[in-house]
Image (spheres, rainbow, N blue to C red):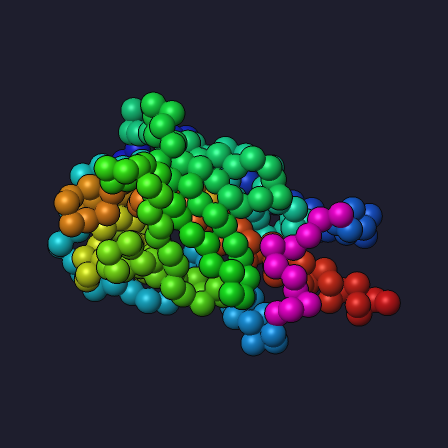
């Protein structure tokens, strides 16, 4: 259904090692770390929504009907290991995320200044900064993407999110008022060996624009199906880059935002579990 990405190694011998269960000494080392959102401000309903969303971050009960309207023309490889289930909820140590072409050359690079910040800047292969993301996670704190150098006056133009912060699916609002959505969907071809599986699907005005496929053949080496925020093969359809469509860098930047949200949902739930364990043991 989609072009394969060469230069990827996805052998089963390279599976992510299962992290040991958090120890009390490890938990004590978390005292200097802060969760993505102050868990004391989260309502019981929001906590339940986060737990439910994290448990199915890379799966979906929504099945797509057969659709011949999506015509893949290009694929990129997002190189991100994400975070496993059994891991202390520390920020990801990688400050850069590479996005590569089919031939293995660099297409984009997303960089952030420090581990504790989700703010990042996306640059193309020439090093030109194209999109910066001001990242927030929590109630009333929506991330914003700034399109850099668009228009004759080279002013910043913003893309905003318009979905509940605990939601897995996210709606984005373009400067002209049009919207597009990233959602988790199931369909044949998304899973291992062309079988049915789940993927992140970008749609706009009823058309599928791009798909992030993360199965055993495409997900980032060292990650698992249960990892949150791991990369894979980003398949771009024919509408990407068209006059009335989405530019390629917007597709990439918003996909990376979805992965960041996966990580922060996972970390928040891990902090919640550790906090409950400490409270129960005191």
Which quadrant of the figure has residue 74?
A: top left
Which quadrant of the figure has residue 160?
A: bottom left
Please indicate, yes or no, whether residue 238 appears anywhere in the rendered image: no
Image mark count: 0
Q: Is the magenta stretch mostly helix, strand or loop?
A: loop
Q: Residue 133, position in %: x, y?
A: 44, 45
Give me the residue at 35% from left, 36% from top: 130
Q: Give the range drawn in magenta.
A: 32-42
Q: Is residue 35 magenta?
A: yes
Of residue 221 and residue 247, the one placed in the foreground of this image is 247
Please indicate, yes or no, whether residue 126 appears anywhere in the rendered image: yes
| 267 lies left or right of 69 | right
Q: Residue 143, position in %: x, y?
A: 46, 54
Give me the residue at 80% from left, 69% from top: 280
| 77 lies left or right of 236 | right
Q: In which quarter of the image is the C terminus?
A: bottom right
Give me the residue at 65% from left, 55% from top: 35
| 229 lies left or right of 63 | right
Q: Residue 5, position in %: x, y?
A: 30, 33
Vertical position of residue 114 compared to residue 88: above or below = above
Q: Is residue 231 magenta?
A: no
Give me the residue at 68% from left, 63% from top: 273
| Outermost residue, bottom side | 45
Q: Residue 137, position in %: x, y?
A: 53, 57
| Outermost residue, right side | 282
Of residue 148 and residue 199, the one placed in the foreground of this image is 148
Vertical position of residue 51 compared to residue 159: above or below = below
Of residue 39 and residue 54, the one placed in the foreground of this image is 39
Vertical position of residue 219 compared to residue 177: above or below = above
């Amino acid at each position: 259904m989609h072009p394969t990405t060469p230069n990827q190694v996805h052998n089963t011998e390279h599976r992510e090692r299962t992290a040991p269960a958090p120890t009390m000494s490890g938990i004590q080392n978390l005292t200097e770390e802060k969760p993505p959102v102050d868990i004391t401000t989260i309502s019981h309903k929001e906590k339940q929504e986060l737990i439910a969303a994290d448990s199915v971050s890379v799966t979906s009960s929504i099945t797509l009907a057969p659709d011949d309207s999506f015509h893949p023309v290009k694929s990129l490889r997002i190189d991100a290991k994400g975070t496993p289930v059994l891991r202390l909820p520390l920020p990801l140590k990688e400050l850069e995320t590479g996005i590569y072409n089919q031939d293995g050359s660099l297409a984009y690079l997303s960089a952030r200044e420090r581990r504790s910040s989700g703010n990042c800047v996306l640059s193309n292969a020439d090093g030109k900064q194209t999109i910066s993301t001001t990242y927030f996670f929590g109630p009333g704190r929506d991330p914003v993407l700034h399109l850099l150098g668009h228009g004759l006056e080279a002013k910043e133009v913003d893309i905003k999110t318009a979905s509940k912060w605990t939601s897995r699916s996210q709606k984005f609002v373009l400067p002209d008022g049009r919207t597009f959505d990233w959602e988790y969907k199931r369909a044949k071809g998304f899973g291992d060996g062309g079988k049915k599986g789940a993927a992140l699907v970008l749609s706009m005005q009823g058309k599928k624009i791009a798909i992030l496929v993360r199965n055993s053949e495409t997900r980032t080496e060292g990650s698992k199906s249960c990892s949150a925020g791991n990369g894979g093969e980003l398949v771009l359809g024919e509408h990407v880059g068209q006059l009335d469509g989405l530019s390629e860098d917007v597709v990439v930047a918003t996909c990376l935002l979805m992965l960041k949200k996966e990580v922060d949902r996972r970390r928040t739930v891990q902090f919640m579990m550790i906090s409950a364990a400490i409270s129960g043991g005191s």
